[in-house]
Amino acid sequence: MARAADEIELRTDFSLLIDGELRTSEQHLDVVNPAYGAVFARCPAAGRAELDAAVTAARRAFKGWRKTSYAERAALVKKLSQALRDNQQELAELLTREQGKPLAQSVAEIDRGAAQSDGMVGIEIPVETLVENEKQHIELRYRPLGVVGIITPWNAPVNLALGPLVSALYTGNTVVLKPSPYTPLTTLKLGELMKQVFPAGVANVLAGGDELGRWMTEHPHIDKISFTGSVATGKKVLASAAATLKRVTLELGGNDPAIIMDDVDPKAIAKQVFFASFVNSGQVCMAIKRIYAHEKVYEALCTALVAEAEKAVVGDGLDPATELGPIQNKMQYEKLIGILEDTKRRGAKILTGGEVPKGRGYFLPPTLVTDVPEDSRLVREEQFGPIVPILKFTHVDDALERANDTRYGLSGSVWTSDVNRGAEIAAQLEVGTAWVNQHRATSAFVPFGGAKESGYGRQYSVLGLKGYMEPEVVSVAK
Ligand code: NAD
């Protein structure tokens, strides 16, 4: 495994952003570099006082911000995406240190976040005329909600902050943003950039633990929560937000199936299927989590995927040779080791990988598994890591039934040389997004979100933006 030099000094150059000021606090968070399993940075952590100060600032700033035009707000968002690009390398290195992903993928995450931000602020939300005649004029307008609390997970902290952040700001809301305690640092640096761009109080960034997230969901002066994270926490967020009837968008976990039909060339698709399963070491909400392969192509697909896995270089994300970084945190690492042990106990066949390496850091090799019972943890749960089952099917109806036999419903894909048939099969997947001959393709103009327990509401596109707004009918009798 490739390893770069040890981390030496503790980095502490981080601040909260509250009311346009960079602030410290009494509590702090220690942040671990998962490639070493060792603390490399410390940042301030917000308590209730900091949350109240941020919410008060955001409420005050809302009065002016809501009156600005879409064009003015779009111009400031574009300034932010430019600032992200100007600071991309430094931000990407920090992101890799705290999150673990290969540097090229950190660079890509920032690129993608900036591009999607620019895309979103090109979307128009016009006033809709519903009735126009001699007697009446009825129109449907959309106005901002107020203060939006944004809570993000640890797997793609920049991109998953920018989606809701830009949606909220562009539609005229102000924001309090809280990253995961495992990966707060790049988000705090995003706060420093936002300080240069937005009026004081419009965007506030608070690092903090899980309890800070809970306080946000309970806060009487936050109007909406945009939450990205696990299903279990998503349910708590929804329950807690009910007390104040906050609006809620939930982007939750998935157990995303890929159905590989009998007419594909397994060698030709292996690279793409492998990447969609193992990118960020499988720690992607919409990564392929279960591969259903037709019996005609099953053996050849297994061989081609194993070849991809055995080529992949696992190591410290700062090493340019690395293609797969570590698991982001110890808790997730131990969960994955538990799933691996359960998979072996259930008599499954490990085609490649499957051994936990000795030494520092939370590393696991890409692991492909066959002959695994459908009711095993690996098939039923969201593994969120580099262990993927390949399951055989004979009839597509059976594959669809098994693919849909889950409470999850984020995304899925169908792989076939008959694209029309592929689209018909894809439409039968019970998911928010069903792809054909691709997986993990998203855009600022296309809604993304989960069916069933994978989510509530949508992000991106005009549909997503309207989730940050209150529809209001103005009905005029002439
Ligand atoms: P998590 O649910 O443990 O934590 C997410 C965030 O919620 C963190 O900031 C955490 O501090 C906060 N939090 C914890 N308890 C809270 C509470 N009671 N109230 C409010 N906030 C609370 O999730 P995670 O482990 O950080 O992230 C991994 C999960 O996120 C996976 O399930 C993954 O699929 C999902 N995810 C979904 C999407 C999507 O777009 N659908 C994208 C990325 C990740």
Image (cartoon, rainbow, N blue to C red):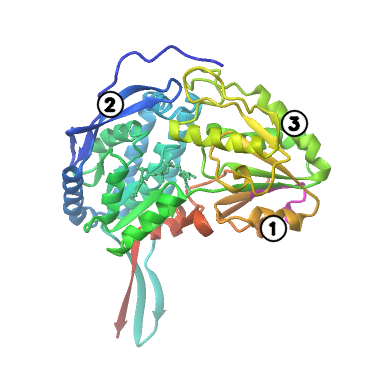
| Magenta extent | 413-424
Circle 3 or circle 2, nearest the eye? 2
At horizontal 27% and vertical 59% (from top left) the residue drawn is: 223
Amino acid type, residue under disc 2 in the picture: Arg
Q: Which residue is mark 2?
A: 42
Left or right for 32, reference 380: left
Q: Callout 2 environment at 10 Å: few (<14), some (14 to 19), or many (20+)?
A: some
The residue carrying mark 1 is 401
Which residue is found at the position 61% from the left and 25% from the top?
355
Task: Give the Cα distance between marks 3 and 2.
Answer: 43 Å
Mark 2 CB in 8 Å range of ligand 1? Answer: no
- Location of the N terminus by quadrant is top right
Farthest bottom residue in view: 135
Q: Secondary structure at mark 2?
A: strand
Residue 324 picture location, percent across and down: 55, 26
Q: Amino acid at mark 1?
A: Glu
Depth check: give the residue in front, 51 or 36: 36
- Disc number at residue 467? none
In the displayed orientation, state which residue is furthest to the right. Answer: 296
Q: Earlier in the sequence, mark 3 or mark 2?
A: 2
| Residue for point 36% across, 33% down | 84
Q: Mark 3 sits on what residue?
A: 304
Q: State the image coordinates of residue 166 (x, y, percent, origin top left).
A: 36, 47
